[in-house]
Every structure is written in structure tokens, then in C-alpha cells.
Amino acid sequence: MTFILGNINDRSVLVLDDFYFDVQTLSNGALSSDPMDALANCDLLHRLSGLLKDATPTGRIAAETIGAAVPRPKNCFAIGLNYKSHAEESKMQLPTNPLVFTKFPSCLVGPHSDIEMRSDGVDYEVELVVVIGVGGKDIEKDNAWNHAAGVTIGQDISDRIVQFAAQPPHFDLGKSFDTFGPIGPFVYSTDHFSDLNDFQLVTEINGETRQNDSTKNLIFDVETLIAYLSQVTTLTPGDIIFTGTPDGVGAATGNFLKDGDVITTTISGLGTMVNHCRRVSDYAKGA
Ligand code: ZN
């Protein structure tokens, strides 16, 4: 049975249509209210999901109550230059191995959270986000999808000024400002999808389409990324991987995000996130 897992009012929930069901209640306390606990028990989520049609919903979903579907991963990996089109627009060489960096987990926010920008060089990057359900080390590529709990939408928001303030660029810092990791709205278990290698990703800014491509054009596919990362570090339930962005980012044209801009991010089968941009105070010089 497929599941759709979310975080509403900081509690783990399962979703059916417009309604949500509290996981702790539904499981009679077998699972806590912590979404991270739920992600470590995917088998139970699959079973609980089968009960939803006969259960009483906890409530109707209101967008502003949805938090980050994965609020506290142990690790938040991200992959740079993982689409040929984006590597070319960035005037960078195609990677011969995955280019891995981290977004600090503290940057993760919900699918309708505001983006707080502290410079005029902030950019958007739609990405498929993979959520690990079954941890492991040295995971075989052929078995990699079996380690994923599901997938969701992510925006790898980036302050290009900070990113390129050092040489070589330090991706982690410029992409980890508070609020620079909206994800959601929900985690969809992998068994929703007949083809896990063809998700269509779209970013619109104020209704204008800026990015539009499919994960079938990833240079390193999800299976390769899971296998590669797990050779180095033991993957843990709830770890997430931002898998890279296609072309159309603002940096390629100088078209950065401005105060009041609305980022609408859609991935086929995974719904939509809507994030408003707010220009807040500048960071201290030298940051
Ligand atoms: Zn990215």
C-alpha cells in the first residue's frame, strides 16, 4: 500500500486527499509524533495507510500548517552540476564523479515558508529530493531504490555571492542560510510511481516558467547517488538527497530573486510548493 507522509503542526501525519491522519493516534502509539520516527518505520506506514479510508481524519489540510516533511535529517546531501544543461549554463565542466556537498539540515523549512534573502544574489534550483527509509553501507546500485522511503520536492535556494566568495567555491555555506531548503509538501512512497527515473521538474517565478526538465536527464541517477554516498557514509533513515537542478537558474542570466517574488515549484506526481521571497537585512560584510 502506498503512503503519503507529512508534517502538520510538527506532528507526523498520513495524507489521503485533502485530509490528514495523526500517525501516533492511527498507530495506537506504536509510532511517536516525530516524522523522523515514522521514516524509520516505513513498513508500518505502508500498513497504516491501508486503514485510512475507514478511519476518521484528524483534520483537513491547511497549507500554512504544513512543515518540512523531513524536519531533522541526520544528513542532508546535495549534488551539484548533475544535469548537462545546468553544467553548460554554469560554464563548468561535466563532472566525472558526483559533486557532493551538504545543505545544513537547519535550512530546511516547509513548502509554504517564506524565503529570507540577505543579499541581491539569491537563486532558485528545483530538485527531486530522495528520502532514505532503510539505512545502509555499501548499498548496491541495483538495490538502491529499495533503501528510499520516498521522494519529495525541494528548492536548493542559493546565495551566489556567498557561494562564490571563496575559491574554490564553498557550496555548503551559500546554500544553507536559514529558510534556504523548502521541501514538501509531502513524502510520496516510491511505490506510487511506475517510472522512478522520469519526474518532470518545473520552477515558475511570478508565474513565468524558468526551469522545466525531467530527472531522466540526470547525469548521475538516484541509484548511482545512493550507492556512491553509501560507500563513504552509512546512510540513515530520514537522510535526504537533493539530486541536482536542470538549467534555467537565475545566475545564468543575472535574474536573481527579488523581494515579493513568488516561487512555484512543481514535480509531476508530487504536488506543488509555493514560497514567497522576503528581502531582509544584509549579512555582515565579510560573510
Ligand atoms: Zn542544487
Image (cartoon, helix red, strand yellow):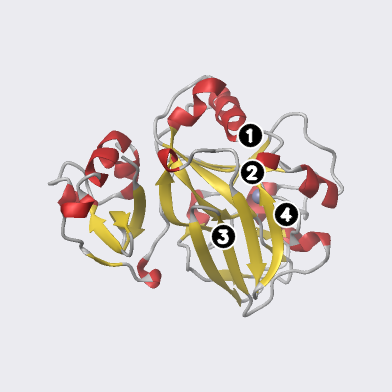
- Disc 1 secondary structure class: loop
Within 8 Å: ligand 1 and the Cβ of disc 2?
A: no
The disc, 1 or 4, on the residue closer to the chain's N-terminal end is: 4
Contact between labelled residues 4 and 3, with CB atoms less than 8 Å apart: no
- Identified at 62% across, 54% down, the residue is 201
The disc, 3 or 1, on the residue closer to the chain's N-terminal end is: 1
- Disc 2 secondary structure class: helix
Q: Is residue 229 left or right of residue 194?
A: right
Q: Nearer the viewer, residue 169 or 100?
A: 100
Amino acid type at circle 3 is Thr
The disc, 3 or 4, on the residue closer to the chain's N-terminal end is: 4
Q: Position of residue 135 (x, y in %)?
A: 42, 29
- Identified at 57% across, 29% down, the residue is 223
The disc, 2 or 1, on the residue closer to the chain's N-terminal end is: 2
Amino acid type at circle 4 is Gln
The CA span between labels 3 and 1 is 20 Å
The disc, 2 or 3, on the residue closer to the chain's N-terminal end is: 2
Q: Position of residue 43 (x, y in %)?
A: 29, 34
Q: Is residue 157 left or right of residue 274?
A: right
